[in-house]
Image (cartoon, coloured by chain):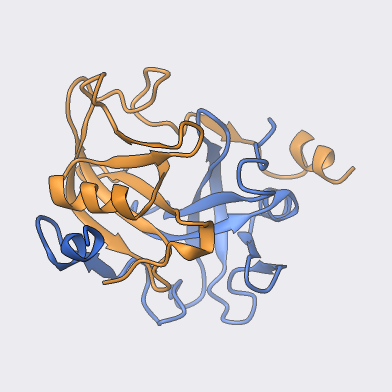
Chain colours: A orange, B blue
Amino acid sequence: MEIDFEKMQGLAPAVIQDAATGEMLMVGFMNRQALDMTLRTRFVTFYSRTRQTLWTKGETSGNRLEVLAAWTDCDQDTVLIRVRVLGEGKVCHTGSRSCFIQELPLGDTALSKEASR
Amino acid sequence: MEIDFEKMQGLAPAVIQDAATGEMLMVGFMNRQALDMTLRTRFVTFYSRTRQTLWTKGETSGNRLEVLAAWTDCDQDTVLIRVRVLGEGKVCHTGSRSCFIQELPLGDTALSKEASR
């Protein structure tokens, strides 16, 4: 199966979901090499856009992400990975389990007013 | 709350999750205007990279995505939206509920051999 990395200049978003709870944990980016390492080693490895290097999630913190299953989507430009979180289970560098910790307000809020200026 | 759209030339990945089941449904991209419309109208609107225009998911098929809650992540460059699927519930244009329908093989498979050439 071929992943389309060309839409994003060699990268594809990789969505990480807790296989046990369904919780969305984080989104990172993978290039071909990172995806290959992820599938082959069964530990999530991303490509860091800022550092321009591969990094295996949790290699220093111990909160590694063990790959239980992986999918791509209908146009093959995104990857979904269902994982088991190892270590202390703190996926986010802020110390929380998920990186999605900031709720956005719905309705006619400050955000939408700001954006419509 | 300010979303960082600059990392991806004006776009941020938007991960869509079924609020009832936790199922990952699709990933699209939003620019500032698409996110604003999504939060304000409470129906998911993406920015199409190929057509370079906003599109409200399900506006023709009826399978609209009603926003129940939205989050951003720790570095504020990704959006997670938990939705209720309206209409027939077929989110993917292939007719399936989720766009993530193609499983990727784990281990030392054809994909990894191909990538390591």
Q: List the single residue furthest toward the right.
A: A117
Is residue B113 visible in the rendered image? The answer is yes
Q: What number of labels is visible?
A: 0
Q: Quadrant of the C terminus of chain A?
A: top right
Left or right: residue A40 compared with residue B12: left
In the displayed structure, would residue B100 be above or below residue A110?
below
Is residue A26 visible in the rendered image? The answer is no
Residue at image location 9% in from the left, 57% down from the top? B108
Residue at image location 66% in from the left, 42% down from the top? B5
Left or right: residue A95 compared with residue B103: right
Q: Quadrant of the N terminus of chain A?
A: bottom left
Residue at image location 19% in from the left, 54% down from the top? A69
Left or right: residue B23 compared with residue A104: left
Residue B71 picture quarter: top right
Tell which of B41 and B53 is nearer to you: B53
Residue A20 x %, y %: 19, 43
Residue B16 x %, y %: 47, 55
In the displayed structure, would residue B95 be above or below residue B47?
below
Residue B112 picture quarter: bottom left
Residue B45 x %, y %: 65, 61
Residue B79 picture quarter: top right
Tell which of B85 and B117 is nearer to you: B117
Residue A57 x %, y %: 29, 32
In the displayed structure, would residue B106 be above or below residue A3?
above
Q: List the single residue furthest toward the left.
A: B108
Left or right: residue B79 compared with residue B22: right
In the displayed structure, would residue A86 be above or below residue A5?
above
